[in-house]
Image: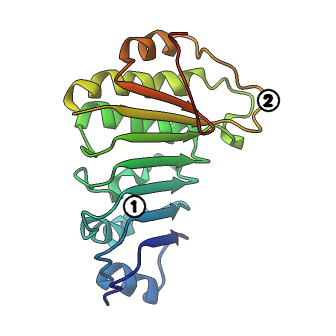
């Protein structure tokens, strides 16, 4: 099945995929795809191999990968469904669990996965942060960026989405110093507006 002109694709997992879902994941080809949004539900580790081939076939035209509601469940992480060389420029983490974000940042720092990524968007408006400071999560991102920046050519953009998180405030504790060191190669944005920690 080839969808020649499809540029945006959204998908929601729901446990064990049904027969038609397996067929779509196995045979669909999206040669013009630019944007994919993947809504996660707990993934049975026995069916992870159903999803991996789909991501392996994604074209080099892919620009944006958005992960929505991803979380670690029963010590099983969904990170394994993504090939480490997946080509995209922007990664969006929307309403993702704190533990998943921390695990992903650790793997990004150590494994050099997603080598073409040039922008990270982190949504801090989520129930997973209720009662928790966001500083450790931003620090996990900052540590990853510090380890990866030397291997990237050109600049990188880190954007946080905070509205309407009333508890949000800068300067992110210990992460601020790391991010300051990475400027000016690192562009910082908050809700679409650029800012600097050097000010």
Q: Is residue 36 visible?
A: yes
Name the residue: 41% across, 41% down. Answer: 119
Task: Kindly report which numbered mark, 2 or 1, lies closer to the viewer in this rendering.
Answer: 2
Which label was assigned to residue 91?
none
Residue depicted at 44% across the width and 88% down the height: 19
Q: Position of residue 149 (x, y in %)?
A: 28, 26
Q: Name the residue carrying label 1.
A: 45
Give the Cα distance between marks 2 and 1: 37 Å
Note whether 156 is above or below 38 in the view shown.
above
Image quadrant of residue 65?
bottom left
The answer to whether residue 3 is above or below residue 165 is below
Q: Is disc 1 surrounded by few (<14), some (14 to 19) or many (20+) residues within 10 Å?
A: some
Q: Quadrant of residue 20?
A: bottom left
Quadrant where the N terminus lies?
Answer: bottom left
Horizontal arrangement in the rendering, residue 111 relative to residue 68 (left or right): left
Total label count?
A: 2
* The C terminus lies in quadrant: top right
Q: Residue at x 33, y 77 (%)?
A: 30
Identify the secondary structure beneath mark 2. Answer: loop
| Residue underneath mark 2 | 166
Residue 176 rendering spot, x and y as whole percentages? 51, 13
Q: State yes or no: discs 2 and 1 in contact (Cβ < 8 Å).
A: no
Residue at 53 percent across and 52 percent down: it is: 70
Query: In the image, 102: left or right of 154?
Result: right
Q: Is residue 155 left or right of residue 157?
A: left
**Image colouring:** rainbow
Q: Residue 86 in the image: x percent, y percent?
A: 27, 55
Label 1 secondary element: helix
């Amino acid at each position: 099945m080839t969808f020649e002109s499809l540029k945006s694709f959204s998908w929601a997992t729901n446990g064990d995929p049904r027969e038609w879902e397996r067929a779509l994941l196995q045979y669909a080809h999206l040669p013009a795809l630019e944007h994919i949004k993947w809504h996660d539900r707990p993934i049975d580790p026995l069916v992870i191999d159903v999803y991996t081939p789909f991501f392996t076939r994604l074209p080099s035209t892919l620009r944006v990968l958005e992960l929505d509601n991803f979380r670690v469940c029963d010590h099983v992480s969904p990170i394994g469904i993504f090939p480490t060389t997946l080509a995209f420029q922007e990664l969006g983490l929307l309403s993702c669990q704190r533990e998943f974000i921390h695990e992903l940042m650790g793997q990004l720092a150590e494994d050099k996965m997603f080598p073409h990524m040039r922008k990270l968007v982190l949504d801090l408006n989520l129930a997973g942060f209720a009662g928790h400071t966001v500083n450790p999560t931003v620090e996990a991102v900052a540590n990853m960026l510090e380890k990866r920046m030397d291997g990237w050519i050109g600049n990188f953009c880190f954007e946080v989405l905070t509205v309407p998180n009333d508890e949000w405030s800068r300067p992110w504790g210990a992460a601020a110093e790391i991010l300051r060191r990475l400027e000016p190669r690192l562009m910082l944005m908050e809700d679409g507006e650029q800012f600097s920690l050097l000010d």
